[in-house]
């Protein structure tokens, strides 16, 4: 994979990384820029900073799309700067950041030193439903449309460039990740995003940049998952599991999360 910046709108860039097939966004204004997500370690963040500086030398504002380690473990290297996120993003990083680090060290012992050196830094500027940032004369909107991939997904809208950064609400190249998701809400949240934002350029949290038709198709898949999960909760899973649009391991994780919602 060629880890170069792709300009997807006027001075709006995406850098797709081999590590987790993850996308970072960069919005460049006059004398200021916005960096969306900071990667999964200080070492990866240092590589990202070097790449940003090849585009602009301006100071930055950082946005975390949500509270999963691969999107914020690099935060400390971007200070001192405003770091924006949903209010629950900051809360969950405070609550679960060390747990996420422990899980990653256990699963990737060869990266122990890399993860141990991370200083966990949550967003210091938070919002609940919407916020607007002035990025060097360009207005960039941050919006939370509801529960989905996580409790705190942030969509970054750059209206003057016609670009939407959807975070992990949209996934390309792999099925959506349901590990701590809200499968019954996710399709509604995506529908709300698509209803409000007409843009054709949609950047997923991972994978290739997609268009509106791709996002609409994924929303329909997620709606099917929610419908089948509700049925399975009543009828049992055996005859329904083959109807889900994703592989069985992904389907079972989605069902487990949906059942947690239905059992409340």
Image (spheres, grey):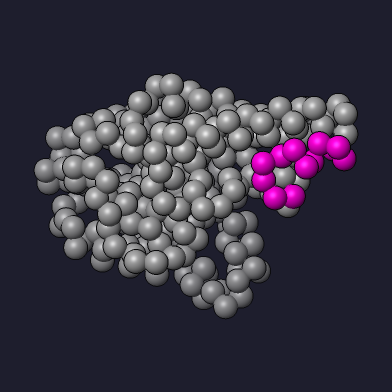
- Which residue is at 52% across, 69% downward? 116
* Residue at horizontal 53 percent and vertical 50 percent from the top: 68
Quadrant for residue 180, please give it. Answer: top right
Residue situated in front as seen by the camera: 76 or 142: 142
Closer to us: 192 or 174: 174
Q: Is residue 140 visible?
A: no
- On whether residue 74 falls in the magenta region, the answer is no
Where, quadrant-wise, is the C terminus in this rendering? top right
Q: Kindly report the secondary structure that dominates the magenta region of the rendered protein.
A: loop
Q: x and y percent of residue 181 in the render? A: 63, 40
Q: Nearer the viewer, residue 219 or 164?
A: 219
Picture quadrant where residue 198 is located: top left
At x 79% / y 41%, what residue is drawn?
241
Quadrant location of the N terminus? Answer: bottom left
Residue 157 position within the rendered picture, expressed as x and y whole percent measured from the top left: 33, 33
Q: Is residue 171 visible?
A: yes
Identity of the residue furthest to the bottom in this view: 110
Residue 147 percent location from the top left of the image: 57, 31
Q: Write the start and end of the magenta stretch as one range.
A: 237-248
Residue occupying image coordinates x 64% and y 68%: 107
Q: Residue furthest left?
A: 30
Q: Is residue 71 left or right of residue 149?
A: left
Vertical comparison of 108 with 227: above or below: below
């Amino acid at each position: 994979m060629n880890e170069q910046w792709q300009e997807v709108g006027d001075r709006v860039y995406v850098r797709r990384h081999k590590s987790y097939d993850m996308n970072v966004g960069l919005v460049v204004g006059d004398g200021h820029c916005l960096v969306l997500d900071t990667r999964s370690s200080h070492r990866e963040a240092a590589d990202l900073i070097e790449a940003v500086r090849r585009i602009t030398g301006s100071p930055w504002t950082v946005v975390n799309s949500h509270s999963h380690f691969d999107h914020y473990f690099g935060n400390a290297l971007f200070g001192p700067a405003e770091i924006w996120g949903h209010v629950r993003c900051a809360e969950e990083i405070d609550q679960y950041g060390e747990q996420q680090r422990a899980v990653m060290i256990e699963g990737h012992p060869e990266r122990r030193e890399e993860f141990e050196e991370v200083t966990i830094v949550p967003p210091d500027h938070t919002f609940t439903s919407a916020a607007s940032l002035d990025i060097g004369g360009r207005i960039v909107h941050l919006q939370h449309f509801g529960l989905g991939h996580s409790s705190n997904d942030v969509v970054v809208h750059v209206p003057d460039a016609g670009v939407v950064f959807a975070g992990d609400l949209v996934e390309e190249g792999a099925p959506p990740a349901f590990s701590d998701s809200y499968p019954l809400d996710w399709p509604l949240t995506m529908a709300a995003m698509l209803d409000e934002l007409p843009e054709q350029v949609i950047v997923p949290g991972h994978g290739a940049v997609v268009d509106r038709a791709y996002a609409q198709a994924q929303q329909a898949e997620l709606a099917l998952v929610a419908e089948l999960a509700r049925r399975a909760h009543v009828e049992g899973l055996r005859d329904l599991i083959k109807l889900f649009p994703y592989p069985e391991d992904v389907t079972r994780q989605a069902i487990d999360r949906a059942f947690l919602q239905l059992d409340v």
